[in-house]
Image (tube, grey):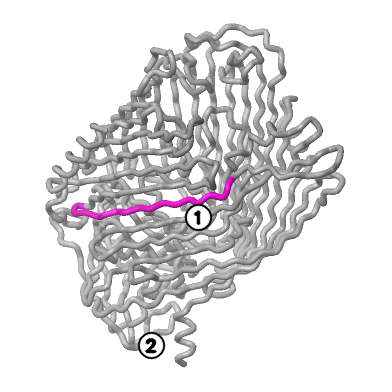
Amino acid sequence: MKQVFLLIIFIISTKNGFAQQVVSTSANKNKTPKEIPANKTQQIVVLDGIPDEDAWKDAGMATNFVEFRPRVGRAEDYASRTVTYIMYNEEGIYFGGYCFERCRDSVATELKGRDKTGNTDYVCLILDTYRDNLNGFEYVLTPLNEQIDAKVILVNNTVNEDNSWNAVWQSATNISDKGWSFEMFIPFSATRFSKKNIQDWGLNMLRKRQKKPAQYSWNPINPSLVNNFMTQEGYWMGLKNVSPPLRLQFSPYLSTNLNHYPTNITGTRNYKAQFSGGMDVKYGINSAFTLDATLVPDFGQVQSDNLVLNTTPFEVRNNEYRSFFTEGTELFTKGDFFYSRRIGGFPIKYNEVSGTLSPQEKISENPLESKLLNAIKISGRTNKGLGIGILNAITQTQFATVRDTISGTERKVETDPLTNYSVIVLDKTLKNNSSISLLNTNVLRRAGNYDANVIALLFDLNDHKNIWNFGGKLAMSNLIDHLPDGESKNGYSHLIYLGKIAGRFTYNLSQTLFDKKYTNADLGYFTNNNTLDHKFQFGYKWVEPKHWYNNMALNFTGVYSMLYAPMDKQSQKNQRTDLQLTFDAQTKSFYNLKAIIGFTPARNDFYEPRRIGYYFKRENIFDLNASVTSNQTKKYTFRVGADVKRYQDFDHTEMINLQLKNGYIFNNKFSLAHELYYDTRHNDYGYTTIAANSEIIFAKRDQLTIENILNLKYSFTNMMGITFRARHYMSKITNHQYYSLLTDGCLRVNVFNRDLNRNVNFFNIDMVYTWQFAQGSFINLSWKNSISTLSDLTEDDYFFNFGNTLRSNQNNNISLKVIYFLDYLTFKKAKGK
């Protein structure tokens, strides 16, 4: 605790030093940010993609765009110039313009679907409504009138764009022999801002010309400067008497699905049909804060997880595809304490069911997920830059079903109690793009089960020139009623970092500590505690095109890791030392090159044994990684990569990973992509099982993993399309020799004779037809197919594995979901007519 108090005192004492002066946000130190007047119009604008109505004469005009990628500061050619207009009325913002080209064929177009850019041109409007250089909104439009929108937030001096955030706004485009033009109308309900009589907003406008390829901005952007575009914006000056509208929107849904799996068990149906309904609600509490709620949600149409054979001691981290937990969650993800897959995830007592069975009982059903009943989140930011986020979700009690094979009776076994999950975040923006945050995650379970609580302080401070950065996070965890005697378990962790973040030469030093009792695994992703890591990073970059490259960077990173305290009776504390040199470059032909050279000296692995007090001695590792990515503006694109690791042990353990990605765009409606991953491990040593005499059994083994992913996309229109994704994953382990792990970290040959080979296959199809039949309203029809096989008979022939998988029992699910968007303002306008 002494460390915590000293750090807090240090932060407070340095706060004024780091945040005493507002930095200029221009792209170049000697240039003043551009300004454009906020003109208000009373005229009617009909969106047809051509901004030629008289109303556009009221707008402020923005021209003289400047290139920022690949060459910084070059003015755009007159023949391909950009002319934009921006104005507002009582209800929202109008943004229109012309993107000139020499001919129609110079316009790159592809229908990719909502929130996906693809191989296409676009224009982008960026609004920093709080003018804090930390939070913004992006509205992107392509020549075929496909919309992309995102929330922008600066985290640890890195811009994060959250494309899962969706707003409802209107647009139209037109392609001609002179290029393409556009008109957009963004209701004030589709953004957030403070309530002031006169406001100045941060503003920038971007254009991408995919065939050149090049990117341009209205206010100059220099990617070599810190914080990228959020601190290099212009200003939209003088919005007057903007009244935030009532934001009240409903998205009720109805869904039905039919599921088939050939259980072939007497008394159990192979078909299951289900009908459900629910609603998403969005309510603007005031001009800055929004409440989002999902009632009886249905996430059955989200993409299937990429299941793998996990031979590591740590949990696989899966991606989040549920829209409620991806949209507008930038506050909750601060510090990486929140892992949303915990909500409605794997039941905490799933593996305990088998221990309750009598000899004649079998498990007939044991769900892998708990049912989410409802969830709400409230988020926003005050006039003075205080961001507040509250998320709460409830999952119902989950049961496994156990069947008596003699009497046929069934009973329920609880695997997950009624649980309440909550996250609370306070995030205060400071001067110089600095911030300080307080975060709390909490898990409350029904009586008889333990609860979990984590509280954390985060800070990120920059000097007045945005050159130096100092920050970190301090956290305390508390498990209540976790120990057998009912006592609590308290833990502590911290991360402290300091570095130079601006200019061509950057560097960073950091320390990460987790004590023996710290954990945030109940609502976060957490692998292991009891560690103390020290890390350094030095980087140098070339951002101006020269010779054969557009840009280039070198980074050298080192990590020294040790145990915070010895485990059990072991005196060893050294874990590992990692050294890595990384080279990145983009060539003049827009190929991206990457190479990594790594070295890890002999180390002690305290986690592979899966038992506290033991460790496994690993030898030196040499690592060489290289990849080439082709020009992404072409119809055919590819990425090829190879990673080779070699151990300096007596068996010369070797790991080779190969990757090949191919994509082809047939036309602006149809595209296809394929990914191949080939991973082989020869003479690899690792944990296998626990013997009857409690010895830890390791094996010398070979492992082969092959993964194929096929993606197809066909768009009928910019409102209707089909996506198809098929994935096959095969992994087989062949054990050659078994060993006992000794207390000194070495291995001794064991005559263990169980067959623990593994042959695993996972196959999935996700096919979705989507039709946006009205603004914010969708009809989705999906088909999901899943197959999994597990055997101890390894098979070398990949195609035999694949064919055998397709011949196995498979689960098929067809679902139809209708979502209808209702906006209070639309009803109000209709009623007024």
Residue 539, percent from left and from top: 28, 35
- Asked if residue 494 lies left or right of residue 114, the reply is left
Q: Position of residue 151 (x, y in %)?
A: 38, 59
Compared across the picture, whether 767 is left or right of 378 comes to right
* x and y percentages locating residue 247 in the rendered image: 41, 74
The stretch of residues the image draws in magenta is 417-432
Q: Label 1: few (<14), some or many (≥20) within 10 Å?
A: many
* Residue that badge 2 annotates: 44
The image's mark for residue 532 is: none
Mark 2 belongs to which amino acid?
Ile
At label 1, the amino acid type is: Ala
Residue at position x 30%, y 84% in the image:
41
Which quadrant would residue 13 be assigned to in this image? top left
Q: Vertically, is 310 above or below 378?
A: above
Q: Which residue is pictured at 32% across the width and 88% down the height?
A: 42
Q: Which residue is mark 1?
A: 393
Asked whether residue 427 is drawn in magenta, I would say yes
